[in-house]
């Protein structure tokens, strides 16, 4: 079975440009999470969806960040305009309803973003 | 909400050495506890879990015991290998009934031959 698929794996852009990160969760998973990983702050939850509906976006750093999930098999995280401090690895993860007990989030390989 | 604190890294060990990575938690009730591992260039993956007090989770030679008296879930391995070099994260549900996990900051382990 295919795992969580993220694209692009690497993105280098200049400050002020729009960045779009993409995620395809595992088929049948009800929950989708976007995390950001940096050396300073570790792994931070940005937003998560349940059945395509955003449930908690309190981790989204500011209005420059937005996320959508138009259907069960696709989600995007957009940064507009991008800033150097947005440089990080962005992970998408998905899970099914029993994650509270199983703890099993399935992570993609991440998108490494560098903003110059 | 729930939180977790794990030891700062990095940790460097020689092959076949004993490993301990400390993790303590603060939580409402007794949630399940987890260790995740992140190999270089990859996403996180579940390493082991324990769902109730005194449970021992184990996988790939790693073990961790859920101790409610000390609110701890330390990761141990008796003899590490070079292939165990990775970042290890302690995690727990963010709150009662939550479907999202709160992760520790991660501990980077390097094993040298």
Image: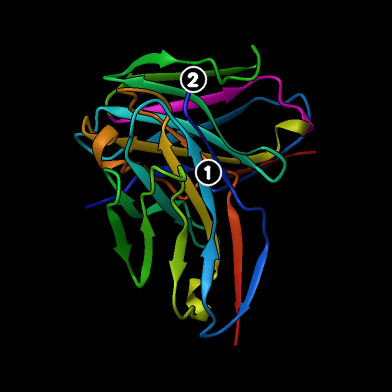
- The mark closer to the camera, 2 or 1, is 2
Disc 2 from disc 1: Cα separation = 16 Å
Q: Along the polypeptide, which appears first: circle 2 or circle 1?
A: 1
- Residue under the image location 45 percent in, 51 percent down: B44
Return the mark for residue A42. none
Task: Write the start and end of the magenta stretch as one range.
Answer: A73-84
Kind of element beneath mark 1: loop
Q: Residue A72: image x %, image y %?
A: 27, 25
Taking depth in this image into account, of B51 and A62 the one nearest to the observer is: B51
Q: Residue A24: image x %, image y %?
A: 35, 37
Residue situated furthest front in the rendering: B69
Going by the image, does A80 lie left or right of B15? right
Taking depth in this image into account, of A18 and B107 the one nearest to the observer is: B107
Q: Split into 4 quadrants, where in the image is the C terminus of chain A?
A: top right
Q: Which residue is mark 2?
A: A67
Chain ID for label 2? A
- Discs 2 and 1 share one subunit: yes
| Figure quadrant of residue A33 | top left
- Residue under the image location 42 percent in, 46 percent down: A108
Indicate yes or no whether the magenta region holds residue B59: no
Kind of element beneath mark 2: strand
Whether residue B79 is situated above or below residue B23 in the rendered picture: below
Colouring convention used in this rendered image of the protein = rainbow
Q: Which residue is mark 1?
A: A8
Q: Residue A5: image x %, image y %?
A: 38, 44
- Residue under the image location 32 percent in, 51 percent down: B49
Q: Residues within 10 Å of mark 2 (few under 14, many from 20)?
A: many
Going by the image, does A29 lie left or right of A89? left
Going by the image, does B69 lie left or right of B15? left
Q: Residues within 10 Å of mark 1 (few under 14, many from 20)?
A: some
């Amino acid at each position: 079975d295919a795992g969580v698929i993220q694209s692009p794996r690497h993105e280098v852009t200049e400050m002020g440009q729009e960045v779009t990160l993409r995620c395809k969760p595992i088929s049948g998973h009800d929950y989708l999470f976007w995390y950001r990983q940096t050396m300073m702050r570790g792994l931070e939850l940005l937003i998560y969806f349940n059945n395509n509906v955003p449930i908690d976006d309190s981790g989204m750093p500011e209005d420059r960040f937005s996320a959508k999930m138009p259907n069960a098999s696709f989600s995007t995280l957009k940064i507009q305009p991008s800033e150097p401090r947005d440089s990080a690895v962005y992970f998408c993860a998905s899970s099914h309803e029993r994650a509270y007990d199983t703890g099993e989030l399935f992570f993609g390989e991440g998108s490494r973003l560098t903003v110059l | 909400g729930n939180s977790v604190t794990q030891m700062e890294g990095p940790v460097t060990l020689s092959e076949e050495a004993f490993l301990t990575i400390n993790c303590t938690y603060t939580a409402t009730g007794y949630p399940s506890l987890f260790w995740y591992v992140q190999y270089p260039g990859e996403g996180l993956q579940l390493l082991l879990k324990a769902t109730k007090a005194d449970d021992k989770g184990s996988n790939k030679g790693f073990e961790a015991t859920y101790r409610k008296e000390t609110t701890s879930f330390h990761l141990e391995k008796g003899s590490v290998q070079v292939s165990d070099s990775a970042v290890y994260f302690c995690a727990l549900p963010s709150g009662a009934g939550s479907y999202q996990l709160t992760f520790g900051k991660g501990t980077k382990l390097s094993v040298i031959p």
